Amino acid sequence: MAALRAQHWRCGEVPLGPEEPGCGLAAGDRVLARSPAGELELTAVLSEDLPRDVAFSPKGRWPKLEGGRANVNALNPGTASDMGASTTVHGVEITLTRAPDPGRRPSH
């Protein structure tokens, strides 16, 4: 975990483990991170420091300061933990897919 703390990823990035490109995502791709609570568009980056099937995104700044007016907290369903009835904000299961290309027209 010390290697993770040494990295300086920017808000809006989602580092992926080096084996993740097998799922069709590449560094620089715009991706949609989705959970039952919502979705957020981020930029994929690759990191040797993350294990397979793990994505990481810093919490970042206040949502109003982010380009999309949201941060990774938009993915948190607010489920209460079993310790102190606080929310489980440090681990949320998500899916990642490539974001739609804004310049591409939908096919009919």
Image: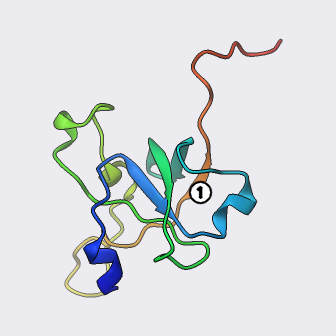
Residue drawn at the location 18% of the way across and 48% of the way down: 61
User: Going by the image, does 33 lie left or right of 77?
Assistant: right
Mark 1, residue position: 95
Residue at screen point 62% across, 30% down: 100
- Say how many tags the image has: 1
Residue 56 pos. (x, y %): 42, 65
Q: Which amino acid, mark 1? A: Thr
Q: Is residue 18 left or right of residue 76?
A: right
Callout 1: few (<14), some (14-19), or many (20+) C-alpha neighbours within 10 Å?
some
Q: Residue at x 52, y 44 (%)?
A: 28
- Along the line of sight, the residue nearer the viewer: 27 or 30: 27
**Which residue appears at 62% of the width and 50% of the height?**
26
The image quadrant that residue 73 belongs to is bottom left
Left/right of residue 95 with respect to residue 13 in the rendered view: right
Q: Position of residue 36 (x, y in %)?
A: 51, 53
Q: Nearer the viewer, residue 46 or 94?
A: 46
* Residue 95 location, quadrant: bottom right
Quarter the C terminus occupies: top right
Residue 58 image point, x, y percent:
30, 60
Q: Measured along the vertical axis of the image, is residue 40 above or below residue 15? A: above
**Quarter of the N terminus within the rendering:** bottom left
Q: Residue furthest right?
A: 108
Mark 1 lies on a secondary structure that is strand
Report the side of 50 relative to 6 (left or right).
right
Q: Is residue 79 above or below residue 49?
A: above
Asked if residue 28 is positioned above or below residue 19 in the image, the reply reads: above
Describe the colour scheme in one phrase: rainbow
Report x, y in % for residue 69: 27, 33
